[in-house]
Image (tube, grey):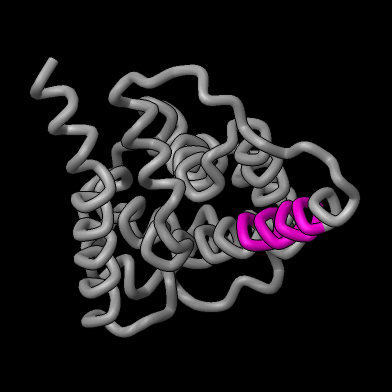
Amino acid sequence: MFKWISNRNNGDEEGSGIEAERRLMEIVSELQGGSAEAFQILYNKYQMRVYSFCLRILADESAAKDAFQETFIKVYEKRSSFRGDNFQAWLFTIARHTCYNIIRTRRDFDEYAENHQVDTKLNNVDHILKDHIEDAIASLPLLLREALVLREYDSYSYQEIADLLEIDLSLAKVRVHRARILLRKTLLPVAKEYNEN
């Protein structure tokens, strides 16, 4: 019954339009009934996108893995609380809140460590362009970072971003635009340095 998703490259591709949406809602309905098979199908379909989102928001592989696992645990535990017709928005809202909780916990730890003279400085080891870009993205304010990640890395439309973040369409566009401006400013010196060498 559910082979339409599970036999496709980890579920990254979808069937066409309304039929695919109807099938997805059938699977979500089965999940709400406790189906492990439905959970596995949805996990396979969204695992790469959720992990990528967590990694880019948290900018830490270990924390992203924790957030990723916690997100899917919460999805299963809270499956009966899903209401509506947009499972993807519900899933990413859970991922988003999970990342926020990890950031809040990390901030609390950093404040504790600072107050207790623990050295929490990061080592500057690698200066390749990719690292500069990742650092620049990680330095963006969280609200701008998540909008940029959804747009540039996950290829969501502005409307989808607005739905996922529960904001107005115009605010989604503004956040992505501001994130791009800040990235440009941050990366301009790096670009000049690479062009000179």
Q: Residue at x 59, y 31 (%)?
A: 61
Q: Does residue 1 appear in this view?
A: no
Observer-nearest of 195 and 80 = 195
Residue 115: where, in percent of width, then height?
85, 56
**Residue at figure coordinates x 36%, y 44% from the top left:** 136
Q: Position of residue 166 (x, y in %)?
A: 43, 79
Is residue 43 depicted above or below 28 in this figure? above
Asked whether, in this view, residue 177 is left or right of residue 85, the answer is left
Query: Residue 104 vs residue 123: left or right?
Result: right
Position of residue 38 measured from the top left corner of the image (x, y, whole percent): 60, 45
- Residue closest to the eye, 37 or 196: 196
Please identify the residue farthest to the right as the structure is shown: 116
The quarter of the image holding the C terminus is top left
**Magenta run includes residue 35:** no
* Residue 166 to residue 87: above or below: below
- Give residue 133's quadrant in the image: top left
Q: Nearer the viewer, residue 114 or 1?
A: 114
Q: Which residues are magenta?
A: 99-111
Q: Is residue 100 magenta?
A: yes
How would you classify the magenta stretch by its main secondary structure? Answer: helix
Residue sitting at x 37%, y 64%: 144
Is 179 in front, or is 46?
A: 179
Q: Quadrant of residue 123?
A: top right
Identify the residue at image location x=42%, y=39%: 135
